[in-house]
Image (cartoon, rainbow, N blue to C red):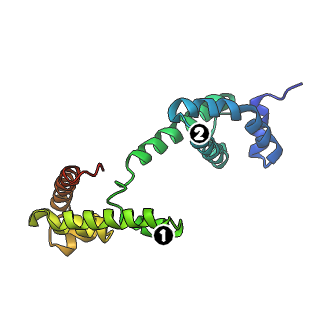
Amino acid sequence: METDDCELVHRARAGDREAFDALTVRYWQRCVGIALIYLRNREDAEEQVQNSFFKAYLHLQSCDAAKFRSWLDKITENECRMFRRNRQRRPWPLMHFGLRSRIASREPGPEKQAMREELVRLVRREVAGLPVLFRETVRLHRLEELGIDQVAQRIVLQVPAAKSRLVRGQQELRDRLRRAGVTP
C-alpha cells in the first residue's frame, strides 16, 4: 500500500530522508513536465526541478502537508520563471569581455581565436567612437566590468544618470556594430 503525502511530509520533517526520497520519486516526472512547459529544454528543466526539490526540502516545515503536491508545483513554476528571467538578463555576449578567460580556456583553433580578437578590436574601436557623453560609461561598465554604482562614482554622476547614459550608450553601440556588419 502506498503511503500518502501527509505521512511522508511528516516523516521527512522528523528527519526521515527516505520519506523525502519517496516524495522526490513520486513527483519528479510531474515537476519535470511542468518545467518543460516553461523552459522547453530537458537539461534546464531537470536542473530547475532539482533546485525546486532542494528548496522544498529546506522549507518543508512551512508546507501544509495536505497540499504538498500543489506547493511543490508552485515552487517548480517559480524556479522556472526566475531561471527564464535571469537568462533574459544575461549580459550581451559581445559586450561582456569577462568571457575572455572562458574563451581562452576552451583553446579555440587559430582561426576562431583570430576572429574573436578581430571582434574584440572592432567593439573596442566602436566604443572609442561613441559620443563623449556615453563612451566612458560604456567602457567602464562593459570593458572594465565595474558595477553601475562604481561607474557613477568614477565619472561623478548620480546612479540614475549613469544608468541612463549606459542604456543610451549601449543602444548607440549596438547600432554602430550593426552598421559594421556585426549582429549583437
Q: Which mark is residue 45?
A: 2
> Is residue 34 or residue 59 the one in the foreground?
34
Determine the image quadrant of residue 113: bottom left
> Is residue 108 or residue 167 the one in the foreground?
108
Closer to the chain start, of discs 1 and 2, is 2
Q: Amino acid at mark 1?
A: Ala
> Is residue 67 or residue 38 the one in the foreground?
38
- Looking at the image, which residue is at 33% across and 68% down? 145
Which element carries disc 1, helix, strand or loop? helix
Q: Is residue 125 left or right of residue 17?
A: left
On screen, residue 147 above or below 65: below
Determine the image quadrant of residue 172: bottom left
Q: Which mark is residue 104?
A: 1
Are circles 1 and 2 on residues that touch, CB within 8 Å? no
- Looking at the image, which residue is at 39% across and 52% down? 90
Q: Is residue 150 left or right of residue 79?
A: left
Percent x, y of residue 67:
65, 29
On screen, residue 20 above or below 145: above
> Is residue 36 or residue 152 the one in the foreground?
36
Q: Is residue 145 left or right of residue 10?
A: left
Percent x, y of residue 143:
30, 68
- Looking at the image, which residue is at 23% across and 68% down? 139
